[in-house]
Amino acid sequence: MTDTGGRLLKAFVHPANEHDKRGGEALLLGMDLSLWPRVRKLFVDWGYRGLKGLASSLGLELEVVARPYAGVRGVWVREGEEAPELPRERGFKPLPKRWVVERTFAWLGRNRRLAKDYEANPRVSEAWVYLGMLRLLVKRLARAA
């Protein structure tokens, strides 16, 4: 979980064979919301839409940032008839708020230890994520001073 500036607030690493929704549940249940009193709204992608009930029970609003509907994927036509022109949006369109976590992953990926998954224990990987963010923030503070 990051803030809108991409700074890491909480991390939870789980095995790859576990759905992200389960990891999201563990992340939300393991959070101490008193550490971040200003966190009131969570922007999530489509895979976390099932967490709305849990988030509302914690006093958080969950907004699912989904891709816009691109229209009909195709139509059936009789043999000999022409297929109608289907309206489609072309080109790349970044979704608001959804790219923030991906950008943070890119920042963390610059750490050699986080470029590949070396650890067997997910808690050790989680610790490396926190260390990578700490390194990034200290580097930014030193540059600003």
Image (cartoon, rainbow, N blue to C red):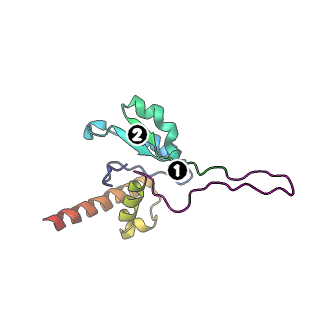
Q: Residue at x 47, y 46 (%)?
A: 65
Residue depicted at x 32% and y 62%: 132
Reply yes or no: does residue 4 show up in magenta: no
Predominant secondary structure, magenta span: loop
For badge 1, the amino acid type reads: Arg
The residue under the point 35% across, 50% down is 2
In the rendered image, residue 5, in percent from the top left (x then y), is placed at 30, 54
Q: Quadrant of residue 44?
A: top left
Query: Observer-nearest residue: 31 or 73?
Result: 73
Q: Residue at x 37, y 48 (%)?
A: 1
Q: SS of the residue at dot 2?
A: helix
Residue 19 pos. (x, y %): 54, 47
Q: Is residue 24 above or below residue 117?
A: above
As drawn, the label of residue 28 is 2
Crowding around mark 2 (Cα neighbors within 10 Å: few <14, some 14 to 19, many 20+) is some
* Rendered view: 29 above or below 128: above
**In the image, residue 84 lies in the stretch drawn in magenta:** yes
Q: Amino acid at mark 2?
A: Leu
Residue 67 circle label: 1
Q: Which image quarter: residue 100?
A: bottom left
- Residue at the outermost right position: 79
Q: Nearer the viewer, mark 2 or mark 1?
A: 1
Query: Which quarter of the figure has residue 105?
Result: bottom left
Gap in Å between the C-alphas at discs 2 and 1?
A: 24 Å
Q: SS at mark 1?
A: loop
Q: Residue 125: horizontal and vertical position, in percent? A: 41, 58
Q: Position of residue 10 (x, y in %)?
A: 35, 48
Q: Residues within 10 Å of mark 1 (few under 14, many from 20)?
A: few
Vertical placement of residue 55 versus 86, above or below:
above
Tell me the quarter of the image containing the C terminus. Answer: bottom left
Front-most of residues 73 and 25: 73
User: Which contiguous range is marked in magenta?
Assistant: 73-98
